[in-house]
Image (cartoon, rainbow, N blue to C red):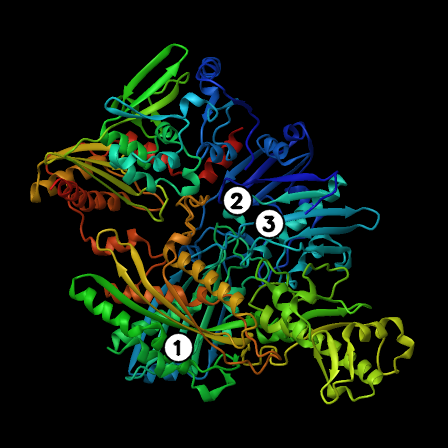
Amino acid sequence: MKPAQFDYLRAGSIEEVVSHLETYGDRARIMAGGQTLMPMLNFRLVEPELIIDITGIAPLAHIRMSGPWVEIGAAVTQSSLLDWSDLSREVPLVAAALPWVGHFQTRNRGTVCGSIAHADPSSELPLVLAVLGGAIDLASKRGTRTLKVSEFQLGMLTTARAPDELITSVRFPRAKKGEGYVFREVARRHGDFAIVSLAGMAVAGQVVLGVGGVAGSPTVRAFGTLKDAALDDALNAFAWEMGGHDDVHATARYRRDLVRMLGKQVIEEARACLS
Amino acid sequence: MPVRGDTLYAAILRSPHPHAEILSIDASKALARPGVAAVLTGPEVKAMTEPFIVGVKAPIDDWALAVDRVRYVGEPVAVIVAGDRYQAEDALDAIEVEYRPLPIELDPRTAARPDATLLHPACKSNIVHDRTFRYGDPESAFANAPHRIKLEVEYPRVLCAPMEGYIVVADHNAAEDSFDVIANFQGPFSVLTVVPRALRVAGNKFRLRTPPNSGGSFGSKLAIFPYMVLICIAAKKTGRPVKWVEDRLEHLAASGSGPHRITNIEAAVAKDGEILALNCDHLEEYGALLRAPMPGPLYRMHGVTTGTYGIRHLAIRNRIVLTNKAPVSLVRGFGGPQIYFALERLVQRIAVELKLEPLAVMRRNLIPANAFPYRTAAGALLDSGDFQNAIATAIDEGGLGELQHRREEARKAGRLYGIGFACASEPGVSNMGYLSTLLPLEARRKAGPKDGAIGTATVAVDGNGQVTVASDSTPQGQGHRTVLAQIVADELGLTPNDIAVNVELDTSKDAWSIAAGNYASRFAASTANAAYLAAGRIRKKLAAIAALSLGVSSESLTFKGGKICSLTDPTKTLPLYRVAGMAHWSPGSLPDDITPGLRETVQWNPRELTPPTENDEINTSLTYGFIFDFCGVEIDRITGEVRIDKYVTMHDGGRLLNPALVESQVHGALGQAFGATLYENFAYGADGNLLTSTFADYLLPTAMEIPPTQLLYQETPSPFTPLGTKGVGEGNSMTTPACIGNAVADALGIRDVPLPITPVRIAALLHGEELPPPAKFTSAPSSTTAATVERRHDSLMQRLFSKREQL
């Protein structure tokens, strides 16, 4: 469990990062909190030539309101976002989901953008971003661009980030009055990757449900005003479409069961938030 | 541990295959890598060492490194020794090994079949031990019983997972051909004899030193011994000290788990729930090798197969089967969890089938309080107890009535709530002869008697009256130093702070015997008593010297506040240091019957630990504590999660030397037991790869998963130990799985409760048939998605080792 040899660069600016990314491409790895990357290095599952540490770049350390968005820089840890006093007013779904992300020890180092970049199908922040319809800001030597979450999340551990690009920030839409949010998760232990995570959003009786841990990436479905048997049928179809998988912690069938049963609860609770 | 400046570091190449022939190993490229000093492979180990001796009569081929064949994923195949661990790991990739995969056996039942693939062809079968025992007249009891109630239970493999893994530093003295090793070995030291034998040196040419501190063990650090051999050979080959530190991946893959046992248990039962006879058929899976002191778990509990119950007719069958899994090692509880999960689940089943209360069945069969010492059917001599009172106290103080009320309310509301009970006789201090029970009488006669359990401690007082204590207990965080200081201070009228305790053990110059070590809950009932007796001898000697000087009788003296004073004449008093000074500074003035100096080593052996009798009766342990547990659980109908509402545990561990340390042992055993019951799953895939190779997949409970527990105590001293103490270290690992299992059975009205009790397994019982996909549903789950997701859950071990193989 010792990493292969690599060079380490503690970058001082975004410019420095993207010029190295231009040279190294996927032979370089960005490190922020290192909560996933460090074990992967120690297991030699990745053997990059260069590690670029971005935690010292001051312009990546911001949490700010920017028009309809809350924008979070790539060096912001999960715990500093959780500590942000406006969080539950501005993005209540993130406030509900963040305590489920790892443990407070890992949140102290793990970053919000790192979790989005890693795109684990069972992690909470990509799910919340998908349900809320957030966006991702990317920078490279070629310039900057902003992708919608639906354009960014391509599948399991796969995103639209090009090898020469750095995620500079992620944007969550600010909550408006008359919206209801619910987050639920089932994991073997608190802090584990979700077996199934569910995020519900209700706006004027229309409900959107997002599910993590079942398909290869977070999956979002609008359930409108469906109720009772019609809702059950729609959830059953949703569950079968996502399919699920067997692993050492749960079966595909168990995951589908939770989508059907907890999905209904989450939808009903999200609607109840409105009344 | 500080090491010499020229120390080299080892990394181990491990098998990616569960079963394969090694066709060739080529280390030439690895040897050319920077910093690499040597590579050890099977042929060399075969040339330089002897295979390990095996505890059963079977030709099991067991070397410190795979020779010609690998038999489990993670088996050591080669050792690289380099300037540092990074260089050693870098070079692992360059060793070229050619394997020819062989068919595998993972399931104990299929591995036991005559047509199974053989792990060790010379054994002719994967069943390497099959022995039956009979006590009383079980056949008649079964034939005449009004009820026969049976259950098949399985106790799966679980790990210990200490914070610190194995560490070995070895050096070889070429002039003397002797080895000097520092390792966090935990004992039993009886096993240590296999190491010099494997290294082809006399026992006195192999010196082991244990460190002052060690980060937990729970049994696992017994199985470090094959690595001692490996690193010793590496040191011999390179002529330099070599250090190896086991990493977490290695620990999870190959340090060894507890055995997997399948027990078919049946009771002959009277109408009122009295168990007239018991029949236990154990099939225990030990992985690819049977390493000393295996098959300990199968025999350690032999005398208390009937638990806390006065069952007089008993039949036992013990079979051992080998599979392509990591070899089994010591795990806290060591046979206890397996015995009690079967027995206590059966007691619950008897209650259900006879429509009795589980507590009533338990009470009907308990050994009466006036029957101690009590000889069980299989030969255990239960020292003391008052089980009935302990249960009554626990029910009262633990609030069983309140739990029953909660169950009633929950059930009225349509919720799933159950209550479970379990009790156990907890052994302490293993009889060094218990394993010989596995041999037929003739073989035992030939080998000579094996019995006893020597506890060793030394108390020394220097010329200034300063006291030091040393012991044979190699603790790994249990607080032995605290307790030893207490005992000796009490004897000598000092405070614990006055006593210096050193628990490092050096086999070349310290006092020890084969029973030394930290296992079988032996400290309080063995080593602590040796320290107490040694301190008593010192006290007697000091009193004799003081009596001479003061002109009083030594019987009239007391030890208090650092002084030795007359009980009758307050003017007659001497500081302890003055008396100690006389023993050292003026030995010539001591009378002939007082030996000079002040150092006493006691090797104490309890007489109750006798060898197996001609009828295979064996007193497996010295002391037997009592545990009674009950709990309430609620089960979530949707997720299948088991929530422990409340857990109550009552312990009678004899006289408690330090209640705070006992409490920490109980909490620790409870934590491990909650893990074994609800979370931990040492899982192999159908292809023989270990699926739980990191802590993300092998789920240990954290503080968040530990439910509210209430700890209660009763103290019934043991008449067999000078201090009245019993062993208390393993405790709830034995009762808790059965207690929770019984509560789940009660909540769901089910017969079989598989371990671990996972949400998926419970949900499968609760959810019934799955809703079919909608009629117009055509797109089955996208195959690419399913495949990628599956890839992610492939064994990390396989990916790691395969990657190396491809290079």
What's the residue type where badge 2 is placed? Arg
- Residue denoted by label 1: B278
Asked if B292 appears above or below B652 in the picture, the reply is above
- Measured as percent of width and height from the top left, residue B450 is found at 64, 73
Report whether residue B404 is seen.
Answer: yes
From this view, report whether residue A110 is shown above or below residue B192: above
Query: Mark 1 near mark 2, Cβ–Cβ under 8 Å?
Result: no
Reply above or below: A159 against B618.
Answer: above
Q: Residues within 10 Å of mark 3 (few under 14, many from 20)?
A: many
Q: Is residue B721 left or right of residue A120?
A: right
Real-space CA distance between mark 1 and mark 2, rounded to the nearest whole angstrom:
42 Å
Tell me the residue at 29%/63% (across/down).
B633
Residue farthest front in this picture: B571
The answer for which chain carries disc 2 is B
Residue plotted at (77% across, 74% down): B576
Total residue callouts? 3
Which residue has dot 2 on it? B248
> Contact, CB < 8 Å: mark 2 with mark 3?
no
**Residue B751 visible to the viewer:** no
Residue B278 coordinates in the image, percent (x, y): 39, 77
Among numbered discs 2 and 3, the one appearing first in the sequence:
3
Whole-number angstrom distance, CA of label 2 to CA of label 3: 10 Å
Q: What residue is shown with label 3? A: B166
Q: Amino acid at mark 1?
A: Leu
Q: CA distance from mark 3 to mark 1?
A: 41 Å
Whether labels 1 and 2 share one chain: yes
Question: x%, y% of residue A223?
Answer: 13, 35
Nearer the observer, B445 or B743: B743
Quadrant containing the C terminus of chain B in the rendered view: top right
Chain letter of the residue beneath label 3 in the structure image: B
Q: Could you tell me which chain the residue with mark 1 belongs to?
A: B
